[in-house]
Amino acid sequence: MAVKLVGREAECKPIIQIANNSLQIIFYLINSMNTCMLLPNAKNISILLIFFMIFPISNVYSLDSKNTIIQNYDLILCGIVSSKLPSGSEISGPIYKIEIINFYQGSLSNFTLTAIGSEDTNGPRSMKPLNIGEKAIFYVNEINNHYILSPFSVKIPQCSNKFNSSPLGQSRIGIEPNDVQCSIPFELAIKKNDNTPACVTPETKLILIERGWAKSKS
């Protein structure tokens, strides 16, 4: 989007660049009009009106807004797989022993967790298998006195001190765009040209795909 700037151009350029790379263009443009002395013209105003009609604020998660996935789990933690055993006769899924590095949600009396992997029938989708020595973000629920790893538990390169559950926050700690988790009822949409993840309503996702913004599969 071409936007005419007056004064403080160097300070305002980052705002315009961010707006061009996310669904939050409306908010950044409005903010820019106040802080960067944007001169709105007929084209800019019409674009704003179109965005308000197509993308109601309630239909899009800001890439930096708080995601409520933390409410879905008893524990969210980052750790390293120290051992992995095949599933037992009474338990479907391998048994992971995890050395915990950081707690992001909930806590335990120690920094070791034994949990069942959701690689078979414990979850709505298959969890990507983890190997001994790999670090991961583990989403955990306690069910019938067993700790169960969510299928969304995913490998990352390093454990961060803080966990931001927004789409962009998950990406920043090393989670691949296709593995970003959205809270219900939002769905993951991946931007075609730079793989930026966003959490949007199913209706908005269809519009983004039809208009070529999002990939058809994400």
Image: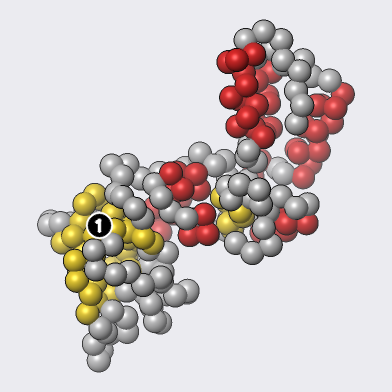
Dot 1 crowding, Cα within 10 Å, few <14, some 14–19, many 20+: many
Image height of 7 relative to 153, above or below = above
Residue 89 in the figure: left or right of residue 51: left
Give the side of residue 113 with respect to residue 127, left or right: left
Residue 14 visible at all: yes
Q: How many marks?
A: 1
Q: Residue 136 falls in which quadrant of the image?
A: bottom left
Residue at horizontal 65 percent and vertical 41 percent from the top: 23
Residue at figure coordinates x 79%, y 41% from the top left = 53
| Camera-side residue of 149 and 14 | 14
From this viewpoint, which residue is outermost toward the bottom?
A: 89
Q: Within the image, what quadrant is residue 120 found in?
A: bottom left
Please determine whether, in this image, residue 28 is positioned above or below residue 147.
above
Identify the residue under disc 1. 79
Above or below residue 117? Residue 185 is: above
Q: Secondary structure at mark 1?
A: strand
Which residue is most to the left? 110
Q: Residue at x 78, y 52 (%)?
A: 211
Name the residue nearer the viewer: 23 or 178: 178
Residue 63 placement (x, y as % from top left): 54, 42
Q: Amino acid at mark 1?
A: Gly
Residue 81, image x, y percentages: 23, 65
Q: Quadrant of the C terminus?
A: bottom right
What is the x, y in percent for residue 60?
63, 46
Which residue appears at 29% of the width and 70% of the height?
A: 131
User: Where does the N terminus fall, quadrant-wise?
Assistant: top right
Residue 114 makes an appearance in the image: no
Across and down, in percent, residue 101 comes to: 21, 52
Colouring chosen for the image of the structure: secondary structure
